[in-house]
Amino acid sequence: KQPAAIIGAGIAGIATAVRLALKGHAVTVFEAQESFGGKMYQFELPGAYRFDAGPSLFTLPQLVDDLFRLAGRDPQDHFRYERLDPITHYFFADGTRLKAWADEERFAAEVEEKMGVPAADVLSFLRRSASAYEATESTFLHKSLHKAATYLSPEVLRAVAALPGLGLTGTMHQRHAKAFNDPRLVQLFDRFATYNGSDPYQAPATLSLIPHLEHGIGAFYPVGGIYSIAQSLVGLAEELGVEFRYNEPVEEILTATGRVTGVRTPQDVYDFGLVISNMDVVPTYRRLLPKQPAPERTLSQPRSSSALIFYWGIAHEFAELDLHNIFFSQDYQQEFKAIFEHKTVSADPTVYVNVTSKKTPPDAPAGHENWFVMVNVPHHQGQDWDALIAQTRQAVLDKITRTLGVAVEPLIRAERVWDPRGIEERTSSFGGALYGSSSNNALAAFLRHPNFSRQLEGLYFCGGSVHPGGGIPLCLLSAKIAAELIKG
Ligand code: FAD
C-alpha cells in the first residue's frame, strides 16, 4: 500500500486518516495549525468559559460510530452522545415561542397549539421530507457523483426514478409556502437552508429533506461538547499509527508526469504516492498546485454563507434558553437578500444562541453561561467587517434584550469575535465560507469538486468544499467516498 499524506486535520482529514490506516496505508497528516479540528476547535475565555468555536449542531452521529466499528472498537467506549429533546427553542419576531420536541407528534401538537397549523399537516410534511431523504441519500451522499459506475448501480437508478414523484420542484421556500399558510412555520423550515450555507429563496426544494435529519433521525449532543468528536477520532487515528504533524503547513503538492509524488512543507520535502487534500479546494489549486490547470468552472461556483460569531461569557442563567435557541428576524426574505444579493449583513438578522453550559455545566462558572451567538453573513469579499461587527453586535443585543426582558450587555464578562476574515485566516476556507460552494441552484450537487483529481493520479479531496458538501456528517461522508476511491 502506498503511503498517504493528508493535508489538514479538519474532521474530514481525520476521518480519512482513520479509514486509510485501516486499509493498511501509512498515513501522515500535515496540519498548519498547532492542533487538530480545523473549524471544530475549542478555546477558553478568561473567567473559565469554554467554547466550541465552530459547529454546534450534530446530526447523524452513527457516522462517527461507524469509524469506531470499522476499527473493531465499541463506539460506546470512546464516544458518547445524547439525543436532544427539545431540539431547539424558537423565538419569533411577533413574540411567539415554540419548542421543537424530538418526538414528531409532540412537535406537531406544539405547532398546532402555538400557530394553529393542523398537526396533521406538519406530520405529513415531515413524512414527505423523510421520503425525500430516503430516496436520495444513497445516491447523493454516499457515492461519488463523478464516476460513471455510480449511475449504473440499481439503487441509484431507483432513486433517480423516484425523484419526480416527490414533488420537489421549485425552491425550498416555495415548497414550504405551499405546505403551510403560517409564515412563522415557513420561516422555521426555510432556516434549514442555512445548514449548508444556502438561501431558501434560491435553493432547490430537494433541500427540504434537511429537516428530516433533525426531526426524523434526531439532533444530538456529544458528551463534553462538539470538540470531543475530533478528539475521540484523533485518539483512534493515533492508536492506528497515524502520524500528526502540527505547525507544518503544506506549501506545495509535488507532481511529475501526471501524478503526485509528495508534498513540500517549510520543514522538509516528503515522498508520497497518495495525497489527500482536506484544505479548501480553491486554495489547494491556487496555492499548492499553481502550475496545474485548475477546474475554473468548479472553483467559480458561488460560495456558501459565512458567519459572524460573538462568544460571550454571561454572568446570569436564563431559564428560557436551552442548548439551541433561535431568535428570528421579522423579514426573512430581506435578510437573505442582504446576504446573497447585497453581500452585507441584515440590520435585523436572525440570531442563533448556543449555550453548551446547559448540557456541560463546567463550560461556565456556577450561575454563568457561555453564549455562542451567531449570525449568518456573506463570505468575505472585502466588506468593512469592523463596521458590520459593531452594527450587528448592537442589533443582536437589542433583539435578545427585547425578547428575554433582561439587559444583556451589562452581563458580558468575556468576549471574542470570529468573522469571515478570521475564519479564512485560521482554516484557509476560501472567503471564510462555512460550507464551500452554496447549494443555491439545482445543479449545485453536481458542480461541487469531485473527491478525486481528473488530472493528477494519486490526488484526492475530502472536506466541506468538495462532494458531498459541508457540515460534520457530509464531511465524514466525503472521507468515506475518498477512501473508497483509493485502490492502491
Ligand atoms: P476544516 O475544518 O475546514 O479544516 C481544514 C484544516 O486544514 C484546518 O485545520 C486547516 O488549518 C488545515 N489546512 C488548511 N490548509 C493547510 C495546508 N496548506 N497545510 C496543512 N494544513 C492546512 N457544521 C455542522 O455540521 N453543524 C453546525 O452547527 C455547524 N456550524 C458551524 C458554525 C461555524 C461558525 C463554522 C465555522 C462551521 C460550522 N459548521 C457546522 C461547518 C463545519 O464546521 C465544517 O463543515 C467542517 O468542520 C469542515 O471540516 P473540514 O474537514 O472540511 O475541514
Image (tube, rainbow, N blue to C red):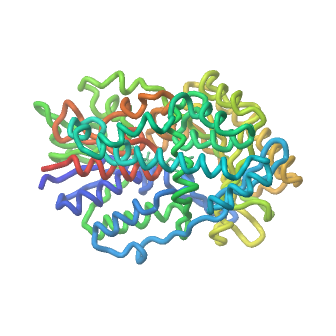
Query: Vertically, is 41 above or below 200?
Result: below
Q: Position of residue 429 (x, y in %)?
A: 45, 38
For the N terminus, the quadrant is: bottom left
| Residue for point 35% across, 56% down | 14
Q: Can I make out residue 414 in this image?
A: no
Residue 66 visible to the viewer: yes
Q: Nearer the viewer, residue 448 or 423?
A: 448
- Residue 404 in the image: state x and y as whole percent: 84, 53
Quarter of image, res 48: bottom right
Q: For this rendering, which residue is in front, 48 or 268? A: 48
Residue shown at the point (65%, 30%) measured from the top left = 336
Position of residue 443 measured from the top left corner of the image (x, y, whole percent): 41, 28
- Residue 88 relative to residue 7: left or right: right
Closest to the observer, 255 or 79 = 79
Image location of residue 364, percent across then percent down? 68, 67
The picture quadrant where one finds residue 182 is top right
